[in-house]
Structures are given as structure tokens and as C-alpha cells.
Image: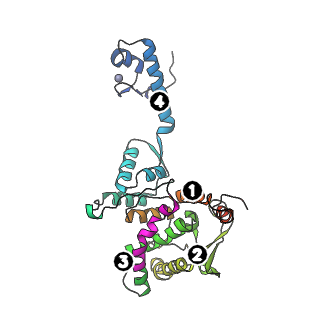
């Protein structure tokens, strides 16, 4: 008899002792199910093979986006990720290397002492829109102080400037429900060419978005526009030095290059305030669900805005 299947593909864990076995039927007959009927052993072998097959097909692949939801704490998230990667699991949607390093550093930080411990609050697709936006409320006090300092030309640390930028990105993603790619690709030119409309500032995004939708526009309140303008005039130039061009990205990191992942920036803001992560997709889903309960008029407008309805 010629066996075409390589021996190492036949390793199956014994359902009784949980040890990996190359020849499960023999192992069961001699050890774990010795003395039981051939029929009973055959059933167990069949079930163990089905289990192994299901694991190979599905169990070996994990999605970092899901890990992020299940493990809001950086230490747990990083620990689980390490274990999966060390054991040859396949992890999809991994963050960039430098972002992994940031997660590693964050996970190595000591836990807050009992007095300042923040109780993790419910997150994920089942929460209401207000819960998804909790980080904006949590950050508000610090942002108010930073706004005043920036306006009055007082010293603001690099970390605070970066957090101010994260907050601006979070407003666009969590409050205006823009997709991360729209936020990443927003240009200085588009910002400078914004036009007033009623009490709104309308920004037209000229390029097609990553989702393949045509050019689009979004409106900002006076307050949010002032926030972004403060970032644009007081923080961004310091990052860019003398390399500014109109087509440059609106959001620029400390290194002077455009941001690569607005989602990760928003995640870092959650980490800073020790809140569980909410991804932009969750927020859009929650918003879509809440919209379904609105009366027809506003619901139609919002549905179109969220890309849930044509026209
Ligand atoms: Zn066994």
C-alpha cells in the first residue's frame, strides 16, 4: 500500500489523554481505549479526525481585529498574539512592525495602582454609539487644557501634541464616522479649500476613497473645525519642518511623514485612557443599527452617509 499523505499530516490528538499520536487507532487499542469495542474506538478516531480537520481549516487562522475586541488590555492582547505567533498560528491583519513594538512597550508598562484603575467598560459591536465615543469624552478635559496651551503659546510636550493629533483623528472617525482611509488620505489642500456652509465647514475629499466610492465631502462644526485648525497651524508645521506641500497628508506624524493607520492612532488613544478598543467598523455598524430606529427623514440621510443605501 502506498500512503500519499505524509506522516506528519496524520498527527491527531488522542481524545482521552490529549497527547499527539501518529497512529491513533493503535494508540487507542493499546492504551487509552484498550478493552473497549472496535466500534467505540472507530467512533472516537472518526471524531478526532474531524476535529483535527476543522482545526486545520479554521482554528489555525486568527484575525488581529478580533483579538483586539476580545483583549482590550494591551498586556493580554500582546501575550496572546506572541503565543499564537510562537506556535505557528496564522494571524491576519497584523499591525505594522513599529505598531507591534508600541503594543509591546505598552504591555510592558506596569498596571495602574488600585486607586487609578479604570474599570473596563463594555465595547464592541453590541454597545451604543455613545459608548464607542467614550474616549472622546474621556479625553475632553486634557484636550481643553492642551487647546489653551497651544493657543497661548505655552510649552506642550511631543507626546501631548501626538495625543492631540490622535484626538483629531478620533473625532473624524468616531464622531463623523469617516472611514480610516478617508482620514489618512485627507490632504492639506483639501483642508485649506474647505468652505463655510450655514454653521458648518464643508471639506471636499477629491480623490476616490479606498472603498472605490466617488469623491465625497463632509461637514464639521465650528468647534471641530477650530480643533483641526489648531492642529494644522500649531502642531503639523513642527512635524513637517520645511517639507510641506499642498498635496501632503493633513495628518503627519512626529517623523514628518503622513500617518499610516488612523485606526491604530485611535487605538493608541484608547490605550492611553485605558479604555477597551473600538474599531471604526464597530462604530459604523452601531451607528447603522441606531439609524434604523430613527424616523424616516434623518434615517435616510444618515443611511446614505454611511453607505448603506444607494442614491
Ligand atoms: Zn491517549
**Against 165, is 93 above or below?**
above
First in sequence: mark 2 vs mark 3? 3
Residue of label 1: 285
Quarter holding the C terminus is bottom right
Residue that mark 4 sits on: 51
140 relative to 250 in the view: left or right:
left
Q: Which residue is drawn at 72% across and 59% down?
A: 310
Q: Do the residues labelled 2 and 4 touch (CB within 8 Å)?
A: no
Look at the image and give the residue range highlighted in magenta.
126-145
In the rendered view, does 285 fall on the left or right side of 300? Answer: left
The percent position of residue 157, horizontal first and vertical second, equals 36, 77
Magenta stretch containing residue 128, yes or no?
yes
Q: Earlier in the sequence, mark 2 or mark 1?
A: 2
Sequence-earlier tag: 3 or 4: 4
* CB-based contact (under 8 Å), mark 2 and mark 1: no
Residue 190, horizontal then vertical, whole percent: 61, 76
Camera-nearest label, 2 or 4? 2
The numbered mark at residue 187 is none
The residue tagged 3 is: 157
Classify 60 as above or below 307: above
- Label 3 near label 2: C-beta < 8 Å? no
Task: Indicate the position of residue 308 as horizontal and vertical percent values.
Answer: 66, 58
Please name the residue that numbered disc 2 is placed on: 220
Secondary structure at numbered mark 3: loop
Amino acid at each position: 500500500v502506498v500512503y500519499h499523505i505524509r506522516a506528519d499530516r496524520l498527527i491527531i490528538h488522542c481524545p482521552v489523554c490529549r497527547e499527539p499520536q501518529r497512529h491513533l487507532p493503535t494508540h487507542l487499542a493499546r492504551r487509552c481505549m484498550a478493552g473497549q469495542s472496535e466500534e467505540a474506538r472507530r467512533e472516537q478516531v472518526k471524531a478526532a479526525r474531524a476535529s483535527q480537520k476543522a482545526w486545520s481549516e479554521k482554528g489555525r487562522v486568527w484575525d488581529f481585529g478580533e483579538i483586539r475586541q476580545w483583549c482590550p488590555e494591551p498586556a493580554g492582547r500582546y501575550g496572546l498574539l506572541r503565543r499564537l505567533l510562537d506556535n505557528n498560528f496564522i494571524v491576519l491583519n497584523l499591525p505594522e512592525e513599529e505598531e507591534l513594538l508600541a503594543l509591546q512597550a505598552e504591555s510592558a508598562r506596569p498596571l495602574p495602582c488600585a486607586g487609578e484603575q479604570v474599570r473596563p467598560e463594555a465595547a464592541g459591536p453590541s454597545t451604543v454609539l455613545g459608548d464607542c465615543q467614550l474616549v472622546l469624552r474621556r479625553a475632553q478635559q486634557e484636550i481643553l487644557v492642551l487647546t489653551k496651551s497651544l493657543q497661548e503659546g505655552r510649552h506642550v510636550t511631543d507626546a501631548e501634541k501626538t495625543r492631540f493629533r490622535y484626538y483629531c483623528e478620533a473625532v473624524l472617525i468616531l464622531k463623523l464616522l469617516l472611514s480610516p482611509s478617508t482620514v489618512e488620505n485627507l490632504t492639506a489642500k483639501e483642508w485649506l479649500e474647505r468652505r463655510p456652509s450655514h454653521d458648518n465647514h464643508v471639506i471636499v475629499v477629491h480623490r476616490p476613497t479606498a472603498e472605490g466610492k466617488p469623491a465625497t465631502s463632509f461637514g464639521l462644526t465650528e468647534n471641530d473645525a477650530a480643533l483641526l485648525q489648531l492642529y494644522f497651524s500649531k502642531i503639523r508645521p513642527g512635524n513637517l519642518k520645511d517639507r510641506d506641500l499642498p498635496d501632503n497628508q493633513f495628518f503627519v506624524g512626529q517623523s514628518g511623514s503622513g500617518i499610516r493607520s488612523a485606526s491604530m492612532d485611535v487605538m493608541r488613544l484608547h490605550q492611553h485612557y485605558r479604555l477597551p478598543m473600538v474599531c471604526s467598523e464597530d462604530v459604523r455598524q452601531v451607528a447603522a443599527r441606531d439609524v434604523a430606529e430613527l424616523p424616516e427623514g434623518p434615517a435616510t440621510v444618515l443611511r446614505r452617509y454611511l453607505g448603506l443605501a444607494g442614491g
